[in-house]
Image (cartoon, rainbow, N blue to C red):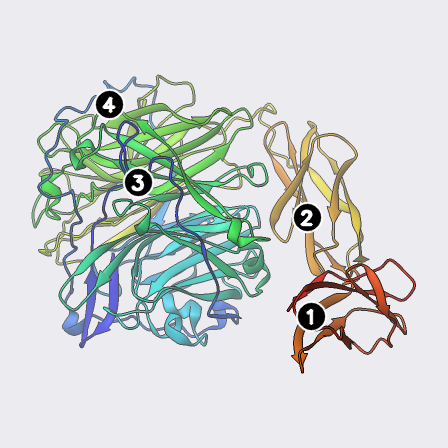
Amino acid sequence: MHTFGMLRGRTIVFAVALVSGAVSGSSTGAAQGQNGPRPVVSFATRTDTSRPVRELPPRPPTPAVLGQIFERPFKLLPNRRGSLEVDTVDTGVQGPVEGLGAPTVAGTFEGIGNRNGVLPPDPSGDIGPNHYVQMVNLSFAVYDRNGNTLIAPADNRTIWAGFGGPCQTRNDGDPIVQYDHLADRWMVSQFALPNFPNGPFYQCVAVSQTEDPTGAWHRYEFTIHQTKLNDYPKFGVWPDGYYMSINQFNCNVVRCSWAGQGVATFERTAMLAGAPARMVYFDLASTDLNLGGMLPADLDGPAPLAGTPNPFVQVDDDGWGYSGDQLQIWQFHVDWSNTGASSFTHVGNLPTASFNSNMCNYSRNCIPQPGGTKVDAISDRLMYRLQYRDFGSHQTLVTNHTVDANGSDRAGVRWYELRNTGGGWSIFQQGTYAPDTHNRWMGSVAMNGLGDIALGYSKSSTSVYPSVVVTGRFDGDSAGSMTQSEVTIVNGSGYQTHSAGRWGDYSQMSVDPVDDCTFWYTQEYYATSGSAPWRTRIGSVKLRDCPTGGGGDTTPPTTSITSPDDGATVSGPVVVAASASDNIGVTKVDFYMDGAWKATDTTFPYEWSWNTTTLNGSHTLQARASDAANNVGSSALVTVTAINPVGISLTASGYKVRGLQKANLAWSGATSAKVDVLRNGAKVATPDNTGSYTDNINKKGGGSYTYKVCEAGTSTCSNEATVTF
């Protein structure tokens, strides 16, 4: 969904579809064995730290003119409308539900409604230890875990009030909320399109300063591209970055045309500290113009091993010109110490059970309601999220998309669990949930720490008002089936009459970080019929009573950093030590620096060897202990300052006077009264430590000379600097 705010006196909602990915494994094409282009690295173009959001005056709703809903039709991309569907039978449709019970709705409360007069809502929300944060087009709100309102619905741009630039002045939508459980922080984002249809185009990102989302936020404006619209941004939390996928378009006043897949990652460690932060971006249009609609992996549960690349996935239908239905797997590796070594590479393609994604020939008016107009199926892409979880013995990815379950435009949800046991990704199980004649679509799926899966979606038909529904399965149930009967979070009692038919464009299923078991889901519905009086609902769901490996134990370990002390100054290699205890036993201690995972120790004494020599400045340290019941206890943050000698830094340049060669040397960091100047390894002078010296070579012609500057009479020297004549 795309809202361009006030454009020519109107609130515009602009929607586009995406294009599919690259060729399948049995074809030849640009994606096969080919890496993406070189990374483009840039700093945030604006950054600051806000006042507490609870103290900021809420921005009034961005209104629709005369109370009307304005919607701009989305543009389908190549290979969609008019494509010849090969598979008319979905071989993944599951059999009858096994009757193992149904999920239990633990709680439900009303979310944000259509206070801005836009279509569609794009509901996104996440759960933390004490809060639920929700964003829609074009508002946000903060609730406690019982649904009490802590920050009343206000324009999303309120978060960037006083920031300056387009993030403050625009309110363009496509929001995402993420709770970063590794750091106990929050991340929110929406794009800004101040000059639409022209660029530059921006991404507004904010990270909470503490665990309290009603407090202050570190705010960032990133310029994504000068000419390409950064549409449909989707985020994933990862230890070394906040990863994003975007569908890119070149736009004019008449239409927007496809301009390729874009992917980026933002410097999470810096953003957690409110420091200047970088973005590493790949434009994949030159790799394969048909790549599009990817999702980045979003982490739940324990952090993966340090340096693990972030997986990206997209879905391909053979009706779009591919050799078999498939999932493409890519991976994004970022190297913040050498950003030029970052890469975005194709890992492989996984053939899926056949499916038909052609719902109503990709028309936006497709899913029936009891009245009004038909609404969007959005069956041309994976639905948010692509959730990642590391169980130690294996890693998992779960995701979903909408398909034609019976060949006659009845929507069902195709879902996948991918696994990696060390030899690469494979499809562990898959299924299409379409148990009766009703339509189910716009899903979101997640797996909890027990391996149970919950799938939420919209449900509608000519006899069922659009409602918010959840089903699920236990770990170990029959593969490919949602074995739990579905449960309704809220029954719809109205329908949408606006001719645009916009629905979604996405919803969000999250896992409660407190027990790593309860699921939280947000989705839209209608309580009354009308042009666009949509509402959103937030519900928590349990598939079981969350038993744990510790015989039901729910007491987290206690842990603390025992060395170094809070406020200490450190240098060189440092041993970070922690104590940990628990009533059923500590299984491991994870060490974090500035919110990023650094090491795991499974045996006492719990230690991590930290080399501070290249990390001068203030840093926070934390230990997180886990027990046999998967409870996690965190230590208090310890702040230390690393101070290490910088050493001698040397630069050199050459010039000629009457043909004679001279080298100008400039250095810093030397501490002695005099320094030794070495040319090609031999000492040529011992001048005073003034920071500069001219070496008169007194030779005509050419040549290359390598210099060092050393503390006088020692082997403590600078880097080499070469002058070539």
Q: Give the spatial CA distance, label 1 vs label 2.
A: 43 Å
Image location of residue 123, percent across then percent down: 31, 52
The tag on residue 622 is: 2
Which is nearer the eye, 200 or 509?
200
Identify the disc placed on residue 652. Answer: 1
Question: Which residue lies under the disc numbered 3?
Answer: 30
Q: Residue at x 82, y 78 (%)?
A: 690
Q: Examine the rendering and report whether any part of residue 368 can be seen.
A: no
Question: Label 1, label 4: how many angstroms apart (C-alpha)?
Answer: 67 Å
- Residue 494 location, x and y as percent? 15, 49
- Mark 1: which secondary structure? strand
Q: Nearer the viewer, residue 378 or 374?
A: 378
Q: For mark 2, does the 10 Å Cα neighbourhood hold few (<14), some (14 to 19), or many (20 or more) residues? A: many
Q: Are marks 4 and 3 in contact (CB under 8 Å)?
A: no
Q: Earlier in the sequence, mark 3 or mark 1?
A: 3
Residue assigned mark 4 = 92
The N terminus lies in which quarter of the figure? bottom left
